[in-house]
Image (cartoon, rainbow, N blue to C red):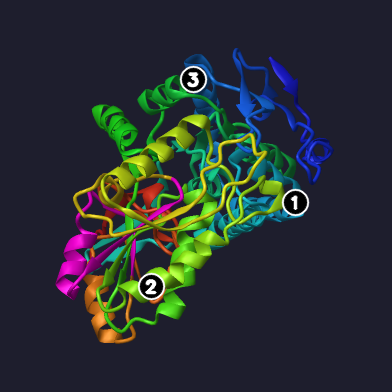
């Protein structure tokens, strides 16, 4: 049943987002077929900063997922038939209204995920850039001709898959929704988005904004939900492509479900990214970047640089330079813009605390720790800098998804590369060295999807193809490359009579 068919913007949410976070954003129903819909099931959205109820959000059932796929299937032919310039214009209009409502969207993202407000604002800025970028570059997605001689013409063009499913995690819902949906819509697909129950509000807001600027009904459907909704989406026979961002275990289930019905999948999974600090590196340049890459969103970033592999000649200097960043880190509610907000849930806080306790019991040395704050009732874990972390421990090799940094010392470049590969993940990495030839050799030796030299931007910019190797997944989001992921090639051959 529809609860609202108007092209509402976000004005009705602004009153619930004061600077102190004391009011509630309200209720968030499903968005299916161009209208807000009362769900079968409502769930409480927990505020990670207070452990209280933040909002009431819909949680889709498999039947409701089916309704959304039917709506997308009905909308797909008309959307694909639009000229790329027409789709691009709508995406750029969506970018404009995201910027217009950036403040309310940033506050929604901050309260939903717990991240500091500065980071929430940066996420909305990036989201608008995604919609702008794909709205612009789609007009330049050119096909190819294959020279076969004067008697024939062979052309390769790009066609949309049809209906694409997007399973979005709770850590960066504003950015991840925009990057995958922006590319899929630009390529001519109709979309069904399943954000996590823990943080669905900005993804749902995008659907309202898309309706406001004139997107056809059924092109963008957003339905929060849990595992049953995700399984229904990946197994649905009318979903032609699935993008998934999340854990390795769930990613394998998604890949198996789509492979079983012969459909492609894009997987962006976990990471255990390393900063490789070689002999002669500029420690004063590296230390603040390394610290920020870990503290960002309380370490709940798949590209967080959670390991530091440092040459023995710089070990003591680097640890001394990193420690003050941890000791000065502030904890608090995201809307107060601390250094570090809460982790997303009580379960995640217990998980990170378990890693911390086991690391200490296995001999890792605490070299820096943020002070605890009295009176916080949410899911806070003070960041910890660990030194002398052995390569045979879980802290060195496994993804924590929390604010714990592991430092390990090596004696050579070869040892550093081997240590970086002492993990099942291959998402990102960084090499720090003032000898650029040496740095490039090392960076090219890393089995990762993105490698940085003397810098680190977790996940990179809008324009940079992004994805992993090994257990970090396959396929590429971001950049022009994502348009190819969300389309399929078709070859047209013409035999020219009399040529």
Q: Which residue is mark 3?
A: 66
User: Which quadrant holds residue 276?
Assistant: bottom left
Residue 448 is tagged as: none
Using the numbered discs, state the Cα–Cα distance from disc 1 to disc 3 in whole angstroms.
34 Å
Crowding near the residue tagged with mark 3, few <14, some 14–19, many ≥20 C-alpha atoms within 10 Å = many
Residue drawn 46% across the image and 61% down it? 293
Using residue 182 as the reference point, say whether residue 253 is left or right of it: left
User: Which quadrant holds residue 353?
Assistant: top left
Can you say whether 96 is above or below 380 in the image?
A: below
Can you say whether 317 is above or below 476 in the image?
A: below
Residue drawn 26% across the image and 30% down it? 256
Using the numbered discs, state the Cα–Cα distance from disc 2 to disc 3 in whole angstroms.
54 Å
Using the numbered discs, state the Cα–Cα distance from disc 2 to disc 1 in whole angstroms.
38 Å
| Residue 351 image offset from top left, x and y in percent | 41, 35
| Residue 106 image offset from top left, x and y in percent | 68, 49
Residue 318 is tagged as: 2
Q: Nearer the viewer, mark 1 or mark 3?
A: 1
**Which quadrant would the C terminus be assigned to in this image?**
bottom left
Residue 347 colored in magenta in the image: no
Q: Nearer the viewer, residue 30 or 353?
A: 353
Q: Earlier in the sequence, mark 2 or mark 3?
A: 3
> From this viewpoint, is residue 462 visible?
no
Q: Which residue is mark 1?
A: 103
Q: Nearer the viewer, residue 171 or 13?
A: 171
| Residue 82 image offset from top left, x and y in percent | 57, 47
Using residue 448 as the reference point, say whether residue 329 is left or right of it: right
Tell me which segment is drawn in magenta: 402-430
Q: Earlier in the sequence, mark 1 or mark 3?
A: 3
């Amino acid at each position: 049943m529809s609860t609202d068919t108007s092209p509402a913007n976000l004005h009705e949410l602004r009153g619930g987002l004061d600077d102190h976070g004391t009011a509630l954003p309200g209720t968030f129903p499903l968005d299916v077929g161009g209208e807000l819909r009362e769900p079968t099931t409502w769930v409480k959205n927990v505020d990670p900063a207070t452990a209280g109820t933040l909002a009431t959000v819909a949680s889709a059932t498999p039947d409701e997922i089916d309704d959304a796929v039917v709506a997308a299937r009905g909308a797909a032919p008309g959307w694909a038939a639009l000229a790329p310039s027409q789709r691009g214009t709508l995406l750029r209009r969506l970018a404009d209204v995201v910027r217009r409502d950036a403040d309310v969207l940033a506050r929604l993202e901050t309260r939903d995920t717990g991240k500091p407000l500065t980071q929430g604002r940066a996420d909305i800025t990036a989201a608008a850039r995604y919609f702008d970028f794909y709205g612009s570059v789609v007009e330049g997605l050119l096909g190819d001709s294959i020279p076969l001689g004067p008697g024939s013409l062979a052309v390769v063009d790009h066609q949309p898959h049809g209906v694409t499913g997007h399973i979005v995690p709770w850590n960066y819902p504003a950015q991840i929704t925009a990057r995958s949906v922006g590319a899929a819509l630009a390529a001519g697909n109709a979309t069904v988005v399943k954000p996590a129950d823990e943080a669905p509000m900005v993804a749902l807001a995008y659907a309202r904004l898309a309706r406001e600027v004139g997107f056809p009904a059924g092109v963008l459907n957003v339905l929060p939900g849990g595992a049953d909704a995700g399984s229904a989406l990946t197994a649905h026979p009318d979903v032609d492509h699935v993008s998934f961002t999340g854990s390795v275990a769930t990613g394998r289930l998604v890949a198996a479900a789509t492979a079983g019905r012969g459909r492609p999948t894009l997987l962006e999974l976990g990471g255990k990214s390393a900063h490789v600090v070689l002999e002669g590196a500029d420690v004063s340049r590296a230390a603040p970047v390394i610290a920020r890459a870990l503290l960002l969103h309380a370490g709940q970033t798949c590209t967080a640089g959670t390991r530091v592999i440092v040459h023995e000649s710089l070990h003591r200097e680097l640890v001394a330079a990193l420690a003050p960043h941890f000791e000065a880190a502030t904890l608090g509610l995201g809307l107060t813009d601390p250094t570090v907000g809460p982790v997303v849930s009580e379960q995640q806080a217990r998980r990170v605390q378990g890693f911390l306790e086991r690391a200490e019991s296995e001999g890792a040395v605490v070299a820096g720790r943020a002070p605890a704050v009295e009176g916080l009732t949410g899911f806070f874990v003070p960041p910890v800098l660990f030194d002398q972390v052995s390569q045979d421990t879980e802290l060195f090799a496994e993804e924590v998804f929390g604010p714990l940094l592991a430092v390990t010392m090596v004696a050579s470049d070869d040892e550093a590369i081997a240590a970086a590969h002492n993990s099942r993940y291959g998402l990102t990495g960084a090499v720090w060295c003032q000898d650029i030839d040496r740095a490039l050799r090392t960076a090219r030796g890393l089995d990762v999807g993105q490698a940085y030299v003397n810098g680190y931007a977790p996940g990179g910019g809008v324009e940079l193809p992004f994805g992993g190797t090994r257990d970090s997944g396959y396929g590429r989001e971001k950049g022009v490359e994502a348009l190819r992921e969300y389309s399929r090639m078709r070859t047209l051959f013409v035999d020219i009579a009399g040529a």
